[in-house]
Amino acid sequence: MSAGVDRRWAELARELQFSQLDQLRKQAEGWRNGLIGLTALVTVLAVLKGRDDLSKLPSPWQTVAILLLGSAFLLLVAGSLVAVRASFGKPGEVLHLGGQSLRKWTLTEIRRVRQALYLSMTAFTLGMALVAAALGVSWTQTEDPAADLVKVATTTGDFCGQLVSYAPSNVTLLPTTGDTTKPLVLRTADVRKITPATAC
């Protein structure tokens, strides 16, 4: 390499020490924006309705999915706050006017911003892993089939099955034994009592 090229690289290296903090703050700002967007996404996922509604999961898996989403939300919020601190510095911090004190503060701040960036990246990775785990739980665990099972006592006998509908005129059950595709329709006037059942 020629002496001119070496000199230019040395000049760039000297300039870099003065712009290093600004570059790190820009990186932290990018992470902050990404984490805030992902936190909003997790919030939307937590309030989804329909088949993906967490309340339709079986009891232990519902708790697991809620804990996973809650932990992911907290991690992403914490990562966002750490990234905000790295982007904009500590509020109300005193500016240093002396050259040596400014240099010392800048080197300390560079170290803090780097640590904050690593923390926000870790929070991002763990948060997304927890979101993926919560989605996996909600997609792989099916509804408890016994949740809608009932025993119906009528004037003509007792019946057991999955409750399909309850109307003023009739009660419709889907039997769990025999022909399970043909609904059993009972007159509401004949029904004495309907109780939840864990099995038929």
Image: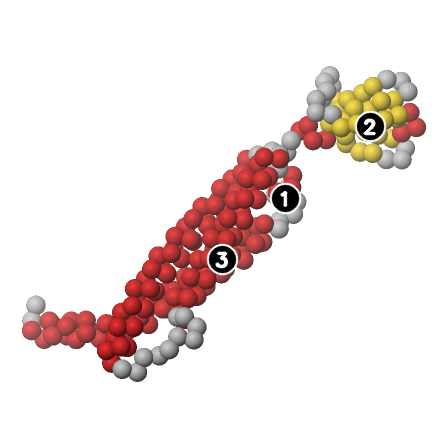
| Residue type marked 2 | Ile
Q: Quadrant of residue 65?
A: top right
The image shows residue 197, relative to residue 75, as above or below, that is above
Count residues near mark 1 (Cα–Cα under 10 Å), then give few for <14, some for 14-19, many for 20+. some
| Residue type marked 1 | Asp
The residue lying at 70 percent from left, 25 percent from top is 198
The quadrant the C terminus occupies is: top right
- In the depicted view, which residue is nearer to us: 82 or 2? 82
Q: Find numbered disc 3 in the image and state the secondary structure of the residue it sits on.
A: helix
Instruction: Locate residue 16 relative to residue 61 in the image: left or right.
Output: left
Disc nearest the viewer among 1 and 2: 2
Disc nearest the viewer among 1 and 3: 3
Q: Find numbered disc 2 in the image and state the secondary structure of the residue it sits on.
A: strand
Instruction: Locate residue 168 relative to residue 46 in the image: left or right.
Output: right
Tag of residue 53: 1
Where residue 32 appears, x then y in whole percent? Answer: 44, 63
Q: Which residue is mark 2?
A: 194
| Residue type marked 3 | Val
The residue lying at 91 percent from left, 25 percent from top is 190
Q: Which residue is mark 3?
A: 77
The residue lying at 86 percent from left, 35 percent from top is 167
Question: CB of mark 3 within 8 Å of CB of mark 2?
Answer: no
The quadrant the N terminus occupies is: bottom left
Count residues near mark 3 (Cα–Cα under 10 Å), then give few for <14, some for 14-19, many for 20+. many
Where residue 52 appears, x then y in whole percent? Answer: 61, 43
Which residue is most to the right?
189
Instruction: Locate residue 153 relative to residue 102 in the image: left or right.
Output: right
The residue lying at 52 percent from left, 52 percent from top is 73
Q: Is residue 185 visible?
A: no
